Amino acid sequence: MSEQSNSKRIAKNTLMLYFRQILIMLVSLYTVRVVLNVLGAEDYGIYNVVAGVVTMFKFLANSMATASQRYFSFDLGKENFGRLKKTFSITFQIYLLLIVIVLLLAETLGLWFVNEKLVIPESRIKAANWIYQVAIISFCFTLISSPYMASIIAHERMNVYAYVSIIEVLLQLLIVFVIKITGHDKLMTYGTLLALVSVINMFMYYIYARKKFPECKFSYIRDGHYMRELISYSSWNLFGASIGVFKNQIGNIILNLNAGVVVNAARGIAFQVTSAVNSFVANFSTALRPQIIKSYASNNKQESLYYVYLGSKLSYSLLYLFIMPLSLEMEFVLTLWLKQVPEYVVIFTRLALLSCLLDSLSLQIMTLAQATGRIKLYQAVVGSLALLNVPLYILGFKLGYGAEIMFVIDIIISFITLVARLIIIKQLTDFSISEFFVKSIMPCFLETIVSLVVVYFVYIHVNGEWLRFFVVCLTSSLVIILSFIFMVLSKKERMQLKSFVYSKVRRNN
């Protein structure tokens, strides 16, 4: 298939996922505000820290989901449909094994930790244990749905992925209205209904994938060699994913032990904002990932590198488009959203967004590493560097720094891991660090400097909160888009963009 045809598919899938994400973000912003007001900072903090203990097991799902998508896309790129069916069935068997492992760990070590180590008011212990149990149920159903979702993404049926997500977020919106009127414990009701949504979500993926994709019909297969290959690949993904989850959730616990549940609520809100903004880039990466892997699988290495270089600067620019005005107008936006802004939320969110911006440059590099299948060195080095966050968090508090030191440490480690990823991927592929610097990093740097100077000048010279907010948003969008077109895109890429826009205009006319 031609590069132009692939680019159009990526653009179409990205637009579909963007529509999905805009709706999800709008609903999420509203639901977080209402949930915070209905539950209160204390119960909201309890939900974040207790459900977060279960989320620590998410690395199991993430590692297998990444492996599933890689192998599904690779088999599709090779057009090896017999192996594709085998991959699905063996992957599903591994997921069932993971569910058993999660239940054993969660009902022993996890349950002990929630009741013996977390700082939870005595009057809310019962509610905290209920939230913990329904979070486990929710997570198990999420695990079951993962291979079906991975197959949908590998087949690039992003419209289905988008529709299921939209239904999910609308159900979450319904939950907000239910907890406002319920006479039962609001925290317990909230957790139970979220678990029910995960069950519905799983059945939607299951029904579609079973109907549309022949390989998504489970059959027991005994192939020890292939299962070991999948487990070996997944185990290194497991290491990398576990480090990320370990860092975030242990960081949440360290914060709880040093500052209490109210500051946990502030960190939870900051992560809600960064997750909403970062998801726009994640949508683009989701649309691009199958093409990078399929190109690599079909031995079209130069095309896969082209998508990596292009995808890295697009990821950065898309994220920067949101981060620039949001960071400048953070206090105004959070006050408008939450009404009562907990302490630390503003500084937490600004620093977390900066860390996400650095990480966005690495998203396509990680996909290329996954495509090679040789991820041992990559995950070992990058994961070990990311693990440094935890002892540095503890050291920061021991030295007397405030809670914001955790986010400063995240930024420093993000920069170090970016450098490490570039060095490692060069060893695995034909990747050129100098070419990546010239084609991706340098254009993004110039875009950042030019837009920052212009937008900050506007920010300090416009008075009135609402007027300044609209002027800053309008100016930043205009400047970043123009600088992206004329500084970030190459001449060839500008011509492709021009052709794509003209084709859409002619079709609409």
Image (cartoon, helix red, strand yellow):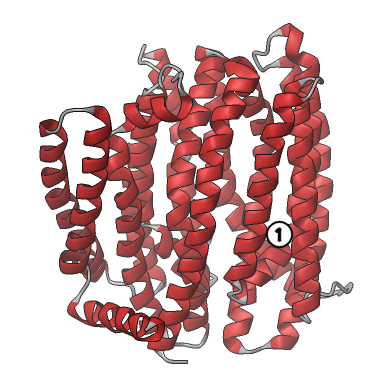
User: Residue furthest toward the front?
Assistant: 509
Q: Nearer the viewer, residue 130 or 39?
A: 39
Q: Where is residue 73? Give x, y as percent.
A: 59, 76
User: Residue furthest toward the bottom?
Assistant: 1
What residue does disc 1 label?
Answer: 146
Quadrant in which residue 345 is drawn: top left
Q: Is residue 138 visible?
A: yes
Q: Amino acid at mark 1?
A: Ser
Quadrant in which residue 440 is drawn: bottom left
Q: Is residue 208 above or below residue 507?
A: above
User: Residue furthest toward the right?
Assistant: 220
Is residue 451 shown left or right of residue 380?
left
Q: Is residue 401 above or below residue 92?
A: above
Q: Where is residue 72? Give x, y as percent.
A: 64, 75
Q: Where is residue 332? Give x, y as percent.
A: 33, 28
Q: Which residue does the image show at 50% across and 45% down from the upper left?
A: 26
Is residue 160 shown left or right of residue 322?
right
Q: Which residue does the image show at 61% across and 15% down from the upper left?
A: 42
Q: Is residue 370 above or below residue 470?
A: below
Q: Nearer the viewer, residue 272 or 30?
A: 30
Q: Where is residue 21? Give x, y as percent.
A: 51, 54
Crowd band around label 1 with a 10 angstrom C-alpha radius: few (<14), some (14–19), many (20+): many
Is residue 395 shown left or right of residue 465?
right
